[in-house]
């Protein structure tokens, strides 16, 4: 209701018609709605404005308006029940996998429903079971849940889907129907979104008590958010956030949750135009896999890729903001993806030898062997072995051999060794081996992107008075890099990145520095790259008055703490609270 003279934002004018409005605006902000009272007396229900005390009545034209009680008698209302049908759809479904749809029929009338049948409607090509469900009689004031199993076709397209339901019944001799509103869900390649393990952003705010790092967009908390700098000065668009998915994935969708909240500032930085890139290397932006514009709302935005793409490092680039401001904010960023399925190369049988020769044996696995690898000794054994070999060689070589074959038997041989393997591998070895190792050593994997290295290995904890070294990589060669420790703000000064883009800061934790979790941030002045990691300061051990040998202190805290801020990334370990997981 609007118009006329206002009193506490409520119209005082006579004969104004009320209107219905949602409790929240389209962009998610709460409305400051007028308040109305429902009053019950012996004749029924009456409605009046809680501020002006003007009741609703029917005017001379038959319209419902507010009128003073001494001008027109307040209208009397009666509540009548209805039959409602509602549907609860699964939030996510996967092609070819069954899911459950629940339909609720609620009889709020004074009459029983008979011959009640519920029918669900699903997208074309989906399998629905049962086709309809018979409820029978539903007494007045009673509700009933009915479940259906839906299975999307294996070739169903990714994207949002809708389901609905209709209830047919008889009441008071009349055949009636009740139809639900549509319920929506997402058909995707995974039933749960994948949360990244680390994030790198081009800018974040770190001033006036407001710190909004990129880690906030991957922490699983919708109430925190990544926000680009607005103090002491704005950083212009475009803005980027690059996340490490932890492994190569076949990505079919990207999920972006805008900043949440009901304050006026919650809309600031809401992304409008965007581009999405996917790469297998943190040093490359990769291929553009999606672009478009987000609506000006605060609900989850699912970007379904036209064609699923494979990669590990995903970049969301914000090109514009809904109100043409220079900021970007984001509450959460996840993806829908699956691990790529490659060919199986592990042999199903292991070649064995009944004895270990006294001289070293040489065997070479090929990518497609036509005969079984030989383990014949290169020279005849001097005597015959008496027992089988203590270690059986494997034909599933690792990427590089780390152990030599056993060259001498553990006991004097007394029998002739076998001249060929007792079993042949069923698949071709993918990596040639120069020797047949006696034991299989695991290949040494490269350190995953976004790890925190601590020396010595005592977590990310440092003691008051200890010297700490922070080392960052991925900056522009020769650029100046500033270092800051916060939340108890301490400047580390400025250092210059070397020819490889590496930079180091050494800092001694003050004796009175506050114990607890702190963050170190390194920011390049030219590249504008900002990387950070977290560490914990603990209080120095209390002195007990005894002479110290230095053994216990050095054993626990000796050495320096190295927080490695890798490549283009913020450094994070697998621990939830380490690095940018805060």
Image (cartoon, rainbow, N blue to C red):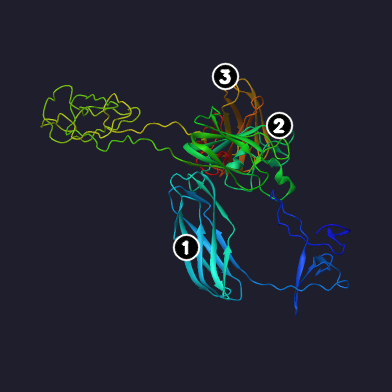
Query: Observer-nearest residue: 565 or 128?
Result: 128
Q: Is residue 450 above or below residue 266?
A: above
Residue under pointer 3: 499
Residue 551 in view (yes/no): no
At a point 13% along the width and 23% down the height, the residue shown is: 380
Is label 2 in a helix, a strand or a loop?
A: loop
Residue under pointer 2: 236
Q: Which mark is residue 132?
A: 1
Q: Which of the marked residues, 3 or 1, is nearer the chain's N terminus?
A: 1
Q: Nearer the viewer, mark 2 or mark 1?
A: 1
Q: Which of the marked residues, 2 or 3, is nearer the chain's N terminus?
A: 2
Q: Position of residue 553 (x, y in %)?
A: 52, 38
Q: Residues within 10 Å of mark 1 (few under 14, many from 20)?
A: some
Quadrant into which the C terminus falls: top right
Query: Observer-nearest residue: 526 or 14?
Result: 14
Q: Gap between marks 3 and 1, in whole Å? A: 70 Å
Task: Give the image quarter of residue 374.
Answer: top left
Q: Is residue 471 above or below residue 167?
A: above
Evaluate if marks 2 and 1 touch, with contact meaning CB atoms under 8 Å apart: no
Q: Which mark is residue 319?
A: none
Q: Position of residue 459 (x, y in %)?
A: 51, 40
Q: Gap between marks 2 and 3, in whole Å? A: 28 Å
Q: Which of the marked residues, 2 or 1, is nearer the chain's N terminus?
A: 1
Q: Is residue 284 left or right of residue 97?
A: right
Residue 429 in view (yes/no): yes
Q: Nearer the viewer, mark 3 or mark 1?
A: 1
Q: Gap between marks 2 and 1, in whole Å? A: 57 Å
């Amino acid at each position: 209701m609007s118009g006329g003279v206002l009193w506490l934002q409520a119209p005082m004018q006579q004969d104004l018609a009320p209107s219905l409005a949602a409790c929240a605006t389209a962009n998610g902000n709460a409305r400051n709605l007028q308040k109305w009272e429902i009053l019950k007396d012996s004749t029924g229900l009456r409605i009046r404005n809680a501020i002006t005390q003007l009741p609703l009545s029917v005017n001379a034209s038959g319209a419902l308006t507010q009128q003073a009680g001494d001008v027109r008698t307040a209208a009397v209302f009666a509540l009548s029940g209805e039959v409602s049908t509602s549907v609860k759809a699964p939030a996510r479904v996967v092609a070819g996998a069954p899911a459950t749809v629940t339909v609720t029929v609620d009889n709020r009338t004074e009459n029983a429903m008979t011959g009640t049948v519920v029918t669900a409607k699903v997208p074309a090509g989906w399998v629905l079971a049962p086709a309809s469900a018979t409820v029978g009689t539903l007494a007045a004031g009673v509700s009933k849940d009915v479940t259906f199993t839906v299975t999307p076709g294996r070739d169903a397209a990714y994207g949002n889907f809708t389901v609905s339901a209709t209830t047919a019944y008889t009441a008071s001799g009349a055949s009636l129907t009740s139809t639900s509103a549509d319920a929506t869900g997402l058909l995707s390649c995974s039933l749960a979104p994948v949360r990244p393990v680390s994030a790198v952003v081009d800018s974040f705010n770190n001033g006036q008590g407001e710190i909004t790092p990129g880690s906030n967009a991957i922490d699983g908390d919708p109430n925190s958010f990544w926000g680009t700098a607005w103090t002491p000065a704005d950083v212009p668009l475009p803005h980027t956030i690059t996340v490490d998915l932890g492994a190569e994935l076949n990505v079919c969708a990207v999920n972006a949750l805008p900043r949440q909240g009901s304050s006026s500032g919650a809309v600031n930085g809401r992304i409008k135009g965007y581009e999405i890139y996917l790469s297998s290397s943190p040093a490359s932006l990769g291929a553009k896999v999606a672009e478009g514009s987000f609506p000006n709302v605060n609900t989850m935005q699912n970007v379904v890729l036209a064609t699923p793409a494979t990669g590990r490092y995903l970049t969301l680039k914000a090109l514009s903001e809904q109100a043409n401001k220079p900021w970007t904010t984001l509450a959460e960023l996840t993806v829908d993806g699956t691990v790529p399925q490659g060919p199986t190369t592990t042999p199903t049988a292991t070649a064995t030898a009944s004895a270990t020769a006294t001289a070293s044996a040489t065997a070479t696995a090929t990518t497609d062997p036509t005969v079984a690898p030989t383990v014949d000794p290169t020279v005849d054994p001097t005597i015959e072995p008496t027992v089988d070999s203590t270690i059986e060689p494997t034909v599933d070589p690792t990427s590089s051999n780390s152990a030599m074959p056993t060259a001498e038997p553990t006991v004097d041989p007394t029998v002739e060794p076998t001249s060929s393997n007792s079993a042949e591998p069923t698949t071709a070895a993918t990596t040639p081996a120069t020797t047949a190792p006696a034991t299989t050593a695991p290949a040494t994997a490269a350190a995953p992107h976004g790890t925190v290295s601590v020396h010595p290995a005592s977590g990310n904890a440092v003691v008051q008075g200890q010297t700490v070294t922070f080392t960052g990589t991925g900056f522009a060669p020769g650029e100046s890099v500033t270092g800051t420790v916060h939340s108890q703000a301490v400047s580390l000064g400025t250092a210059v990145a070397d020819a490889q883009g590496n930079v180091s800061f050494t800092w001694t934790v003050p004796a009175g520095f506050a114990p607890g979790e702190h963050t170190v941030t390194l920011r390049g002045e030219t590249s504008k790259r900002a990387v950070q990691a977290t560490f914990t300061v603990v209080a120095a051990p209390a002195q007990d008055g005894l002479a110290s040998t230095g053994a216990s202190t050095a054993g626990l805290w000796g050495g320096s703490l190295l927080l490695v801020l890798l490549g283009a990334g913020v450094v994070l370990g697998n621990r939830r609270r380490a690095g940018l997981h805060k």
